[in-house]
């Protein structure tokens, strides 16, 4: 499994309520995406950075998401360029399902 961490420095800070509205407007785009296990939306405490943590089945499936089209979508939505960092995720602890998942 692969974790991708995408962050965007905003031109000006936003509130938690503003972030929630934006996130809810884009969340349906990620339903049913091949290989995407879970996505968490994030907002920094000072409201100046937003992003997402994505858990993927594979790097190839993650790469299929972060295309130039996706980067353009981010630029239009947030007014900034995204940064994406990839990390291997060999073990995941899921307390909701009470499972330890091994890649």
Image (cartoon, grey):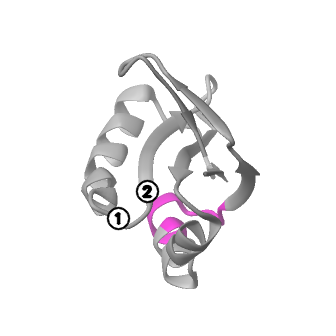
Count numbered badges in the picture.
2
Image point 65% across, 62% down: which residue? 82
Residue 56 on image: x %, y %: 53, 55
Image point 35% across, 64% down: which residue? 33
Q: Is residue 99 above or below residue 58?
A: above
Which one is in front, 82 or 64?
64
Residue farthest bottom in this picture:
68
Q: Is residue 67 left or right of residue 34?
A: right
Query: Is 80 covered by the magenta stretch?
Result: yes
Query: Is 52 covered by the magenta stretch?
Result: no
Image point 52% across, 57% down: which residue? 57
Q: Is residue 59 above or below residue 44?
A: below
Q: Which residues are magenta?
A: 74-82
The quarter holding residue 97 reads top left
Which one is in front, 44 or 11?
44
**Residue 36: mark:** 2
**Residue 75: mark:** none
Residue 80 on image: x %, y %: 62, 63
Classify mark 2: helix, strand or loop.
Answer: strand
Residue 101 on image: x %, y %: 53, 34
Classify mark 1: helix, strand or loop.
Answer: loop
User: Can you identify the residue that label 1 sits on?
Assistant: 33
Mark 1 near mark 2, Cβ–Cβ under 8 Å?
A: yes
Give the distance between the C-alpha atoms of the residues marked 1 and 2, in whole angstroms: 6 Å
């Amino acid at each position: 499994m692969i974790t991708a961490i995408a962050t965007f420095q905003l031109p000006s800070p936003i509130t938690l309520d503003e972030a929630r509205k934006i996130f809810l407007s884009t969340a349906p785009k990620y339903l049913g995406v091949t290989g995407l296990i879970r996505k968490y939306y994030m907002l920094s405490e000072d409201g100046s950075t937003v992003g997402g943590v994505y858990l993927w089945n594979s790097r190839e499936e993650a790469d299929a998401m972060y295309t130039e089209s996706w980067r353009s979508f981010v630029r239009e939505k947030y007014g900034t360029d995204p940064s994406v960092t990839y990390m291997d995720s060999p073990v995941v602890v899921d307390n909701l399902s009470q499972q330890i998942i091994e890649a």
